[in-house]
């Protein structure tokens, strides 16, 4: 029997169940992600922009010029306001602020010209990528710009397992999470939020974000291709505090009109069951910013944590 089935059964019996655990929230507004980031992915891996992030202007995405050389493999020459990019047999020429460019000598009208922002030159992503022979796809649901392959890597290819020994003190009153039959996990795979999308055994999770409802309640919002009725279960890890198990708030689940294979799901940070199960009368004092990790209850050869860097 798969680990997910075992843990799912235990959580159903012990925790007042994953399914419908917060049905009293049905009348509240669906939580929102404030300023949901636009991410650029090369071969299904997010690109880090350490100083100037991608910007939307007139419906087009502009990215720092360095992205062209670092990620797309183009050779760049910048002379004053004139930009020249070469890759193989392709040559692009444009001018900062110019409304046209040339690709192998042929003139092209740009939807949005390149611009200078805070000492950085930003160029239109779609135009430059396609001119260099890359495929580009806009994913409005995930706020992703996919360039190149869209094949999502497996968990095992994203994070290597390390010893779980330094993290065992996070499992106060929650040691059962580390047990699978007669096996106890000795390793953990530690992720960052920017490691998504990831292919797990039973689903692809495209992204996880911090969200809030209109009344200030905190949630984790995820987008995945799983249509499972009960949904994935998380557990919240904070040093000195008991492990807190969290099922999906099913009444908030959203179907995506643009892509029928995707579901948007919500997990509440504060849950009244902490008082019943853990004897925690101060359960309402739990704050997302104080968590160290968020655990994912997925089928794996090791425990799976996400560092709590969601609010950075």
Image: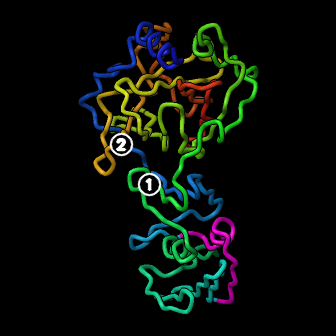
Q: In 3D space, how far apart are the residues under numbered discs 1 and 2 (Cα atoms)? A: 16 Å
For image coordinates 61% across by 82% down, the residue present is 90
Q: Position of residue 132 (x, y in %)?
A: 58, 75
Label placed on residue 261: 2
For image coordinates 40% across by 27% down, the residue present is 231
**Magenta residues, as a range?**
63-80
What is the crowding at mark 1: few (fewer than 14 residues within 10 Å), some, or many (at least 20)?
some
Q: Earlier in the sequence, mark 1 or mark 2?
A: 1
Which of the pair 73/53 is nearer the observer?
A: 73
Q: Position of residue 219 (x, y in %)?
A: 43, 33
Asked whether, in this view, residue 245 is left or right of residue 18, the answer is: right
Above or below, 305 relative to 4: below
Q: Position of residue 301 (x, y in %)?
A: 64, 24
- Identify the colour scheme used: rainbow
Q: Which residue is mark 1?
A: 143
Queried whether the magenta region covers residue 125, the answer comes back as no
Whether residue 285 is visible: yes
Which of the pair 137/58 is nearer the observer?
A: 137
Whether residue 312 is visible: no
């Amino acid at each position: 029997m798969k680990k997910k089935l075992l843990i799912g059964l235990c959580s159903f019996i012990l925790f007042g169940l994953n399914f419908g655990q917060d049905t009293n929230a049905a009348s509240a507004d669906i939580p929102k992600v404030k300023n949901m980031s636009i991410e650029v992915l090369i071969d299904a891996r997010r690109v880090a922009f350490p100083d100037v992030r991608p910007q939307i202007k007139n419906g087009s995405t502009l990215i720092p010029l360095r992205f062209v050389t670092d990620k797309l493999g183009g050779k760049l020459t910048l002379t004053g306001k004139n930009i020249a990019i070469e890759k193989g047999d392709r040559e692009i020429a444009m001018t900062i602020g110019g409304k046209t460019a040339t690709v192998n000598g042929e003139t092209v009208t740009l939807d949005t010209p390149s611009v200078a922002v805070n000492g950085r030159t930003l160029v239109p992503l779609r135009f430059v990528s396609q001119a260099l022979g890359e495929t580009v796809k806009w994913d409005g649901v995930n706020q992703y710009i996919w360039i190149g392959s869209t094949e999502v890597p497996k968990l095992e290819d994203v994070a290597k397992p390390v010893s779980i020994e330094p993290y065992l003190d996070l499992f106060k009153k929650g040691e059962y999470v580390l047990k699978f039959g007669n096996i106890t996990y000795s390793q953990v795979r530690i992720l960052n939020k920017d490691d998504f999308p990831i292919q797990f055994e039973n689903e692809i999770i495209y992204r996880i974000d911090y969200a809030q409802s209109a009344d200030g309640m905190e949630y984790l919002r995820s987008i995945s291709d799983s249509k499972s009725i009960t949904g994935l279960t998380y557990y919240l890890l904070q040093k000195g505090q008991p492990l807190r198990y969290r099922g999906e708030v099913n009444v908030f689940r959203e179907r995506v009109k643009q892509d029928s294979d995707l579901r948007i799901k919500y997990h509440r940070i504060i849950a009244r069951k902490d008082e019943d199960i853990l004897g925690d009368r101060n359960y309402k004092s739990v704050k997302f910013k104080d968590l160290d990790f968020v655990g994912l209850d997925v089928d794996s050869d090791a425990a799976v944590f996400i560092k709590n860097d969601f609010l950075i």
